[in-house]
Amino acid sequence: MRGVVMYAPGDVRVEERENPTIVEPTDAIIRLAASCICGSDLWPYRGAEPADHAPMGHEYVGTVTEIGSDVKNVAVGDFVVGSFVASDNTCEICEAGYQSRCVHNVMMGAIGTQSEYARIPLADGTLVATPGQPSADLIPSLLAASDVLGTGWFAAVAAEAGPGRTIAVVGDGAVGLLGILAAKQLGAERIIAMSRHADRQALARQFGATDIVEERGDAGVARIKELTGGLGAHGVIEAVGTQESMMQAIRATRPGGHVGYVGVSHDVTLDGQELFFSAVHLHGGPAPVRRFLPQLIQLIWDRTIDPGVVFDLTLPLEEAAEGYRAMDERGATKVLLTV
Ligand SMILES: [Zn+2]
């Protein structure tokens, strides 16, 4: 099969990879309907994480082609969506809703789903079948549920988005934008998007942002306070993962408020005393997408939400390198790879 391999930072190739086979009786094999490039794939692409002949990709939707002897919840022919972390969905951590930290978790990034086929470990706990075969126009939205929508949703839940609340969003990538969609669905009264890109501001408004703040850092925090009677937002979604974005999120949150942080943290250091006096709740980490998948699939199936519009560039898998380049140069927000 064809699959994406990152030889080294900046060096992405599409090459022949071995077709996956059932390894554990709890595995399933899927034929991907589409895959995509994640903002987090840019960390190794830019050299902020090591990359040495690594298969790439952790988002996926597709049709089950084979199941192991212990798999009971999905069948060959089912169209399925799964999270970027495989989970058993039965351990205590899963039962509490934190499937991304399942005691048996398998990071799908280590398997690589920018490919024609993929092995899905712990299929029963990981995969959720759609109500039927989706029409082609639903595929991008279902694919978004696999990570960026699920992650934005968790961030909005962690930031306690809800009626009467003002939510600010740091980061205008796909996760930040879908965090806006989630906050709106959860009933937030006011949603402040922090973005200085006209096209992303437009998408932010389409998803439900009521205000746009272009300033960053201290100036951005000052602007959020100005918009919230000097108090700060009730909740802030942090969807970047840098020192600046994390501090912006904590400082823009009012005392007693909630920060939902889902940007993969890189070189972030928190000052204990500032954290102490901020009196904010911090809740985040790798999103337990599996917790939300049944609900998100239904919202997409009913055409209540259309998160697939975050894909603004579609390329064949063969041209994955071009997709990485486009996202790296911010020419594209999110790239869908047709398989
Ligand atoms: Zn578990």
Image: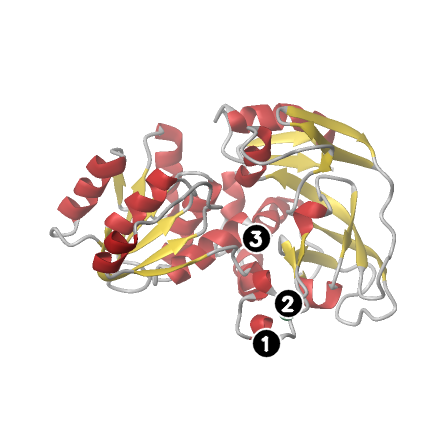
Report whether 313 appears left or right of 60: left
Q: Is the CB atom of the residue marked by disc 2 within 8 angstroms of ligand 1's nearest atom? A: yes
Q: Nearer the viewer, residue 29 or 62?
A: 29
- In the drawing, does residue 261 fall left or right of residue 48? left
Check residue 139 in the rendering and tell me which mark sits there, or answer none: none
Residue situated in front as seen by the camera: 306 or 106: 106
Secondary structure at badge 1 equals helix
- Please say if 34 is above or below 303: above
- Asked where in the image residue 7 lies, by quadrant, the reply is top right
**141 left or right, relative to 194:** right
Question: Residue drawn at (79%, 72%), measured in percent from left and top?
Answer: 72
Q: In the rendered structure, which disc, 3 or 1, sits on the residue that comes first in sequence?
A: 1
Quadrant location of residue 301?
A: bottom right
The reply to whether discs 2 and 1 touch (Cβ–Cβ < 8 Å) is: yes
Q: Nearer the viewer, residue 318 or 265?
A: 265
Can you tell which mark lies on residue 103? 2
Give the quadrant of ligand 1. Answer: bottom right
- Cα separation, mark 2 vs mark 1, equals 8 Å
Q: In terms of sequence position, does the residue under pointer 3 or pointer 2 come before the other?
A: 2
Residue sitting at x 66%, y 35%: 337
Compared to residue 111, the image places residue 123 above or below, namely below
Which image quarter holds the N terminus?
A: top right
Residue type (three-letter) at the residue carrying disc 2: Val
Mark 3 or mark 1, which is nearer to you? Answer: 1
SS type, badge 3:
helix
Residue receiving disc 3: 145
**Going 87% across and 44% down the picture, which residue do you hit?**
19
Q: Which residue has dot 1 on it?
A: 92
The reply to whether discs 3 and 2 touch (Cβ–Cβ < 8 Å) is no
Query: What's the residue type where badge 1 is placed?
Result: Glu
Q: Where residue 265 appears, x then y in whole percent?
A: 46, 45
- Which label sits in the foreground, 3 or 2? 2
